[in-house]
């Protein structure tokens, strides 16, 4: 039914725009056939990497992680990976594959051992003195190479690297600070079998996980029963409700919260990404047949996901909202502050109007997108 193909976990170095990409640089010990699981793909840098600790426990399956490593942040990144693999959960070695994205113009210093130059492709050692503790703890962002040199964060290059590298047909392309609810893989694959008509090769369907955020002093819920309790006592809210409510507006949220909790997974409702949902930026389980993320947009430009979602609207995608799965942001609720507005609005020649004009010429137009 899926007509997917298996991919090896093979290391390679390739150019991508203005970057060198080390694909499958540090590989998981477990490999998967394309139909066997769902991959959680995430992006970040070594100062975000501690978020993988709760994710790997919750997901308990294949993960594809793309990390940006400019200049000497490259070596800090390798230390962070080695720490997680050797000093934290065994699940890191079992399931997590790391890719490194490095700027053409920001190479790390050359490394020598006994006077011999060690190529970057061979510099990683899978060992760490765990008594030293996490190497990223206590590091200030202002002290990183990236911040000192004002290097841009190529979030969409990273997203595409992580997603494309997944061994499995189905991928949940998320962000590093988004934690999944439990038991998603098994329940989703059961749904694929039971509702196979939603997964035909020509279908333009993706499967949305509603997103929430919780107060900073709360633990991120792992199951829907706990989430609903927190929502009702106002320690949890829908994601970015106080910052950009339309960006992550959940269709029929009140009904979703009242649904009976079950270990099974089904479609609750469906929506298009247009009209009152025209700013929606959902995270979803999809495949690598979906449009890729716009690599001309960096994190600093803001609205880095909207261009992909806009393309999906022009392609008339169906967004199927799942009933018993969700994502929750790392604890802490983001609030809009007029005195300190979002700084992610750096000017770019590839602004919203230019990109949307391009996409309409390429894909056609649908009213309401």
Image: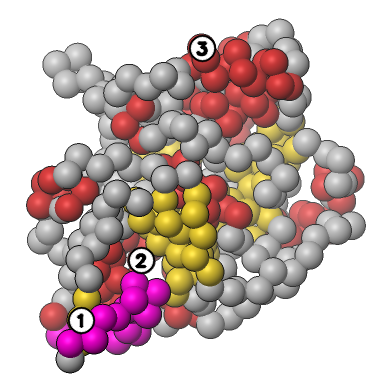
Question: What is the spatial separation of the Cα atoms under label 2 and label 3, in whole angstroms?
Answer: 39 Å
Indicate the quadrant containing the N terminus: top left, top right, bottom left or bottom right. bottom right
The stretch in magenta equals 115-131
Mark 2 sits on what residue? Answer: 53
Q: Percent position (x, y) of residue 309?
A: 59, 29
Q: Nearer the viewer, residue 278 or 246?
A: 278
In this image, 60 relative to 47: left or right?
Answer: right
Question: What is the spatial separation of the Cα atoms under label 2 and label 1, in whole angstroms?
Answer: 32 Å
How many numbered callouts? 3
Mark 1 sits on what residue? Answer: 112
Closer to the eye: label 1 or 3 = 1
Q: Earlier in the sequence, mark 2 or mark 1?
A: 2
In this image, 230 relative to 287: left or right?
Answer: left
Q: Nearer the viewer, residue 83 or 282?
A: 83
Q: Is residue 119 magenta?
A: yes
Is residue 51 visible in the rendered structure shown here?
Answer: no
Mark 3 sits on what residue? Answer: 353
């Amino acid at each position: 039914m899926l007509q997917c193909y298996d991919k090896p976990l093979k290391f390679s170095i390739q150019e991508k725009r203005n970057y060198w990409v080390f694909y499958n640089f540090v590989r998981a010990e477990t490999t998967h056939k394309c139909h066997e699981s769902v991959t959680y793909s995430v992006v970040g840098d070594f100062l975000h990497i501690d978020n993988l600790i709760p994710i790997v426990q919750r997901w308990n399956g294949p993960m594809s992680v793309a990390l940006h490593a400019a200049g000497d942040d490259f070596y800090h990144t390798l230390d962070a990976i080695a720490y997680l693999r050797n000093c934290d959960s065994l699940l890191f070695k079992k399931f997590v594959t790391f890719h490194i994205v490095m700027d053409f113009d920001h190479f790390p210093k050359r490394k020598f051992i006994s006077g011999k130059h060690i190529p970057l492709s061979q510099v990683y050692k899978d060992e760490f003195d765990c008594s030293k503790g996490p190497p990223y703890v206590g590091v200030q962002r202002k002290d990183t190479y990236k911040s000192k040199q004002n290097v841009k964060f190529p979030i969409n290059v990273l997203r595409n690297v992580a997603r494309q590298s997944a061994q499995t047909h189905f991928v949940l392309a998320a962000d590093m600070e988004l934690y999944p609810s439990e038991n998603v893989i098994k329940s989703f694959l059961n749904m694929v079998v039971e509702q196979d008509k939603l997964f035909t090769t020509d279908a333009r369907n993706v499967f949305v996980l509603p997103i929430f955020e919780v107060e900073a002093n709360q633990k991120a819920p792992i199951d829907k029963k706990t989430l609903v309790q927190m929502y009702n006592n106002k320690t949890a809210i829908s994601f970015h409700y106080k910052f950009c409510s339309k960006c992550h507006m959940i269709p029929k949220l009140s009904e979703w919260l009242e649904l009976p909790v079950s270990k099974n997974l089904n479609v609750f409702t469906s929506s298009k990404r247009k009209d009152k949902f025209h700013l929606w930026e959902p995270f979803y389980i999809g495949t690598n047949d979906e449009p890729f993320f716009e690599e001309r947009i960096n994190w600093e430009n803001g609205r880095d996901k909207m261009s992909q979602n806009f393309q999906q609207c022009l392609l008339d995608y169906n967004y199927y909202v799942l009933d018993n799965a969700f994502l929750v942001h790392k604890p802490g609720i983001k609030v809009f502050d007029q005195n300190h507005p979002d700084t992610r609005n750096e000017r770019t020649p590839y602004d919203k109007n230019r990109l949307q004009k391009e996409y309409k010429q390429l894909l056609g137009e649908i009213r309401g997108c």
